[in-house]
Amino acid sequence: MADWRRVRLGAASLITVMALGTIGYVAFGFSVLNALYQTVTTVTTVGFREVEPLTSGAKVFTMVLILVGVGTALYTLGVLIETVLEGQLSGVFRRQRMDRRISGMNDHVIICGWGRVGRVIGREMVAAGQDHVVIDLDPDRIASTTAAAVLGDATDDAILEQAGVRRARALVAALETDAGNLFVTLSARSCGPQLFIVSRVRLEENEEKLRRAGADRIINPQSIGGARAAAFLLQPHVTEFLDVVMHDRDIEFRLEEVEVPTDSPLAGRSIRDAHVRDQTGALVLALREPDGRFITNPTPEHVLSDGQVLIAIGTKDELAALDRLAAPTKTRRDGN
């Protein structure tokens, strides 16, 4: 396969032929300019007249130069064209494969910005088995990911459309500037009113602007990092336990959220009557109401309702059983 090393080799060979041709004609009495001119017209087969009369030796030299120089020039030109076309065609085919891959996605996550924050988010998406699409302006960053990726400006509606924004369930604005994240949030919200948008922010005074632009959640990496460091100082065991439960995929127990959908058999029943613990083994630590309020450590007599989100701890199998228990009866019957 052609590559730029062959192009450099061809170019070096052509320069060598030109230099030797010029030196040869100078040896036959040509001036340096005339020698270079004669060499160029000979190697390129332009066919202009000789700038100076050729002796028998000069004619023999010219014939050799034609055979060697023309061959070298054709080789160099051919390799250059092959490399350029191959790169362009490869890029076209790669883009088509990527478009097909993205077009087959639904309920995926779009990560705008493949910097340090974006890479961490992508790693978590891979660990969770969540389909995601990366958008970044830097070709080198795009080349560094194995995820589905779009090269372009995330503030451009066309780029967001290319990433499947209307079919996505969530978007993360993780660019390096607050202004960039603000524009991404505005564009994403206009393209996908249903999107759950998480935006990164650097300055606290910009948080309200991002909320008005449509961000559902706002994260400040510096603030989170500081709070986490303080938590390790004040309550190291609690903090480490939460870290392990939330992020260590190798341990048995984990924290997850389970929504109580419409027509769920849990709706209208208390936690005790639903036998959540008995049937699934999972422990409900908290509830989140549709209005955003949290109910921590709910009593067994607390009545569940649709639209609530259960925050539960348990093994993978126990949490899966809780998810099935909360599912509408029709969905469970269809799944069986």
Image (tube, rainbow, N blue to C red):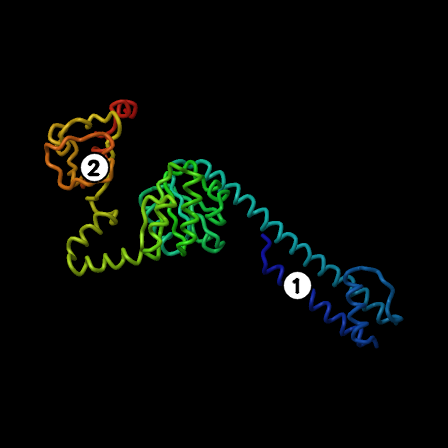
Identify the amino acid type marked 1.
Ala
**Above or below — where is 114 with respect to 270?**
below
Image quadrant where residue 11 sits: bottom right
First along the sequence among labels 2 and 1: 1
* Coordinates of residue 221 in the picture (x, y in percent): 31, 56
Residue in the foreground of this view, choosing between 236 and 86: 236
Label 2, residues with CA under 10 Å away: few <14, some 14-19, many ≥20: many
Q: CA distance from mark 2 to mark 1?
A: 68 Å
Q: Residue at x 61, y 59 (%)?
A: 6
| Rendered image: mark on residue 11 | 1
Which kind of residue does numbered mark 2 sit on? Leu
Q: Residue at x 41, y 41 (%)?
A: 189
Q: Secondary structure at mark 2?
A: strand
Relative image position of residue 97 (x, y in whole percent): 50, 41
Residue 310, disc? 2
Viewer can see residue 127: yes
Residue 122 at least partly seen: no
Dividing the picture into quadrants, the one containing residue 7 is: bottom right
- Mark 1 is surrounded, within 10 Å at the Cα level, by few (under 14), some (14 to 19) or many (20 or more) other residues, namely some
Image coordinates for residue 163, horizontal then vertical, percent: 46, 42
Name the quarter where the C terminus is drawn.
Answer: top left
Left or right of residue 106: residue 284: left
Q: Which residue is found at the position 24% from the left and 37% from the top?
A: 291
Judge from the rendering whether residue 9 lies leftward or rightward of residue 57; answer left or right.
left
Mark 1 element type:
helix
How many circles with numbers are drawn on the protein? 2
Looking at the image, is mark 2 or mark 1 nearer the viewer? Answer: 2
Q: Identify which residue, 205 or 184, lies in the foreground.
A: 205
